[in-house]
């Protein structure tokens, strides 16, 4: 793949203009070979469309009737209809996805709140007023994330069965909290570390108490980070299938568990599957695009800015 | 950290020598520092470490929940079974194959995309948003779409497009693929590469945008070719990011359950360890065996994680040293 700049031989031009512009540009100047960006742009756009095609196809098919959805070759310009959505929301079958969507929302939102309540003080004790050996603590948090869920799922299942917490949304909330806590601590620490020490010291000299300092100095800097952390924790919880499948059933089943009902084909149901996928992915798409700028920081556990 | 005022300090500040009588106050202060950390720490130990210890214990038991009275100490029997049973051995190989191929393919494609997106062009923000979309479809939903809407041999989009292209040339005998039954592993890999490439792209793009441009510009002034710049400046700088993306990706993909469960239900040699473990305890009720397999996954992950931690650590140290 010729992803590199095609020969843009900017040989050391010794003309005065080149020299001048070279020295006049201050700060972080980016490479700007304007000539060959058309090729890069075209390539990027082609690949972007290729990658997004399944998502677009999913959205388009969800607005088609079942007969139009299952044609070969595909019928792109078929009439649009909301039938698949009506079908998915159970207007004819009577099977409603709402309980599972509400379960997913409950589990994701409440576990995210719980994560923030635990992670923010922890991150404070790892950045602004760090405990001794704070790096070791950080890596302990991270190491728990490295342990595959399957290595702990059986005892968790047995425990839940023993105390009668199977098919209970609260137990799932605790699981999701532990799943996301390390990510949140790492993210939050990197956001809190951005609070300038000078400002904290100045606040102290002015005699500001802890709460005032938190409100006036820390919060304004950390707020965007807290929001991004919350969105990413929400996404991970909303997506989770294995724990939900093992620990919940008819009462507390989440949206991904509901989707597993579509695993085996059942006659003409392609448009309905697409409608289901669209509805259940919408919250994640919104949350992801909202947190786009901080997504990479969250996914890399705060290691990459 | 003087005791007179609980000075805010970052690591690296040296603690002042303390008079003896201030010891107890110092200890109280240290606990005050630790207090905010404890709830998160204790919660995590209870929910993650404790269950793993139990898994470890169960892995040495001969325990099938259908005949609980036969439960007995089994020594290393379960581990021997994990490593010799053809299905479980197959699951180990499948896990390695799946993880390595998905990580490498998405890293290479992700690198290409990141290099393209590092340039300025019209609509770059929108292109980036489109590229992130695959990562933001719920994994189960994504697997369902691949299974029913794209790969379905009768009416899937891929075969539909083939039919359409062939019909343009007046042919009605377009080749029709059936990945799900003829190359199920390929189907799983393709769908996962599609999902994970955006993740790699984001990390590598962040890496590209953090490189110091002055050396690149100096090299350009000296007439270095783009390839030479990429080979000697860009790639070495990206190395850390490539490692980080690869290792984090590996940790997530080793654990993949959704795609295998949805696309192939573990059939035709596509069952990876997470799926095999799920089946072993959920349907076969072999608790001891499932636990031993779980411990094997952890050992494998620890090997990968050691490298991952080192990479994260080097990036982290840089940041902590600021």
Image (cartoon, coloured by chain):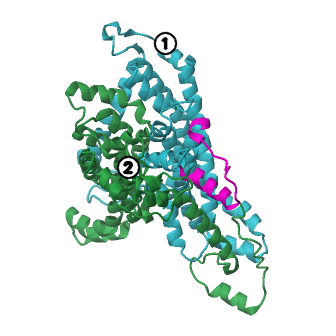
Chain colours: A green, B cyan
Q: Which quarter of the figure has residue A287? A: bottom left
Q: Are marks 2 and 1 in contact (CB under 8 Å)?
A: no
- Which chain is indicated by disc 1? B
Q: Is residue A31 above or below residue B94?
A: below
Q: Residue at x 51, y 62 (%)?
A: A76
Decide which of B18, B72 is in the foreground and name it. B72
Quadrant for the N terminus of chain B, please.
bottom left
Q: Judge by depth and name the residue closer to the eye, A163 or B207.
A: A163
Q: Position of residue B50 (x, y in %)?
A: 33, 30
Left or right: B168 as drawn, with respect to A48: right
Residue shown at the point (28%, 36%) measured from the top left: A248
Q: For mark 1, what is the residue?
A: B77
Question: Would residue B138 be found to the left or right of residue B260 on screen?
Answer: left
On screen, residue A150 above or below B54:
below
A19 horizontally vs A129: left or right: right
The mark found on residue A236 in the picture is 2
Residue A50 quadrant: bottom right
């Amino acid at each position: 793949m010729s992803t590199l700049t095609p020969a843009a031989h900017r040989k050391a031009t010794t003309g005065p203009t080149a020299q001048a512009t070279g020295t006049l540009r201050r700060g972080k100047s980016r490479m700007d070979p304007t000539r060959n960006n058309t090729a890069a742009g075209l390539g990027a756009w082609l690949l972007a469309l290729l990658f997004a095609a399944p998502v677009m196809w999913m959205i388009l098919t969800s607005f088609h009737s079942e007969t139009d959805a299952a044609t070969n070759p595909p019928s792109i310009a078929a009439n649009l209809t909301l039938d698949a959505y009506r079908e998915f929301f159970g207007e004819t079958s009577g099977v409603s996805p709402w309980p599972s969507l509400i379960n997913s929302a409950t589990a994701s939102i409440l576990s995210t709140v719980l994560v923030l309540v635990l992670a923010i003080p922890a991150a404070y004790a790892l950045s602004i007023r760090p405990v001794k050996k704070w790096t070791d603590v950080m890596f302990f948090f991270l190491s728990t994330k490295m342990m595959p869920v399957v290595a702990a799922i059986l005892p968790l299942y047995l425990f839940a069965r023993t105390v009668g917490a199977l098919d209970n949304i609260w137990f799932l909330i605790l699981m999701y909290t532990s799943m996301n806590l390390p990510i949140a601590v790492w993210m939050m620490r990197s956001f809190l570390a951005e609070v300038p020490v000078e400002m904290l010291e100045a606040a102290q000299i002015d005699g500001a108490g802890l709460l005032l300092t938190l409100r006036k100095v820390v919060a304004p800097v950390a707020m965007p980070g807290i929001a991004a952390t919350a969105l990413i924790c929400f996404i991970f919880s909303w997506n989770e299938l294995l724990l939900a499948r093992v620990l919940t059933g008819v009462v507390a089943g989440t949206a991904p568990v509901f989707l597993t009902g579509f695993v085996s084909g059942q006659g003409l149901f392609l448009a309905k599957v697409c409608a289901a996928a669209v509805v259940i992915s919408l919250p994640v798409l919104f949350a992801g695009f909202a947190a786009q700028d901080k997504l990479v920081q969250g996914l890399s556990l705060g290691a990459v800015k | 950290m003087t005791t007179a005022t609980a000075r805010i300090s970052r690591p690296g500040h040296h603690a002042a020598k303390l008079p003896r009588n201030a010891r107890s106050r110092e200890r109280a202060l240290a606990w005050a520092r630790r207090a905010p950390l404890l709830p998160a720490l204790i919660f995590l130990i209870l929910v993650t470490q404790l269950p793993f210890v139990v898994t470890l214990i169960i892995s040495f038991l001969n325990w099938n929940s259908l005949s609980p009275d036969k439960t007995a100490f089994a020594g290393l029997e379960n581990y021997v079974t994990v490593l010799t049973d053809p299905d479980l051995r197959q699951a180990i190989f499948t896990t390695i194959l799946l993880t390595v191929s998905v990580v490498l393919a998405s890293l290479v494609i992700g690198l290409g995309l990141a290099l393209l997106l590092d340039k300025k062009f019209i609509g770059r923000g929108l292109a980036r948003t489109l590229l992130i979309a695959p990562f933001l479809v719920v994994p189960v939903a994504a697997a369902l779409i691949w299974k029913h809407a794209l790969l379905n041999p009768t009416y899937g989009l891929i075969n539909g497009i083939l039919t359409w292209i062939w019909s343009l040339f007046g042919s009605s005998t377009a080749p029709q693929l059936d990945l799900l039954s003829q190359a199920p592993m390929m189907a799983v890999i393709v769908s996962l590469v599609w999902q994970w490439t955006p993740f790699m792209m984001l990390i590598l793009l962040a890496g590209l945008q953090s490189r110091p441009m002055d050396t690149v510009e100096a090299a350009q002034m000296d007439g270095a070719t783009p390839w030479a710049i990429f080979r000697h400046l860009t790639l070495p700088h990206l190395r850390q990011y490539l490692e980080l993306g690869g290792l984090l990706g590996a940790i997530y993909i080793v654990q993949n359950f959704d795609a295998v469960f949805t696309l192939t239900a573990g059939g035709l040699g596509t069952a990876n360890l997470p799926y095999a473990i799920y089946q072993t305890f959920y349907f076969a009720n072999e608790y001891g065996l499932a636990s031993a397999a779980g411990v094997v996954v952890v050992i494998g992950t620890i090997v990968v994680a050691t490298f991952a931690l080192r990479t994260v650590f080097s990036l982290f140290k840089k940041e902590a040293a600021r």
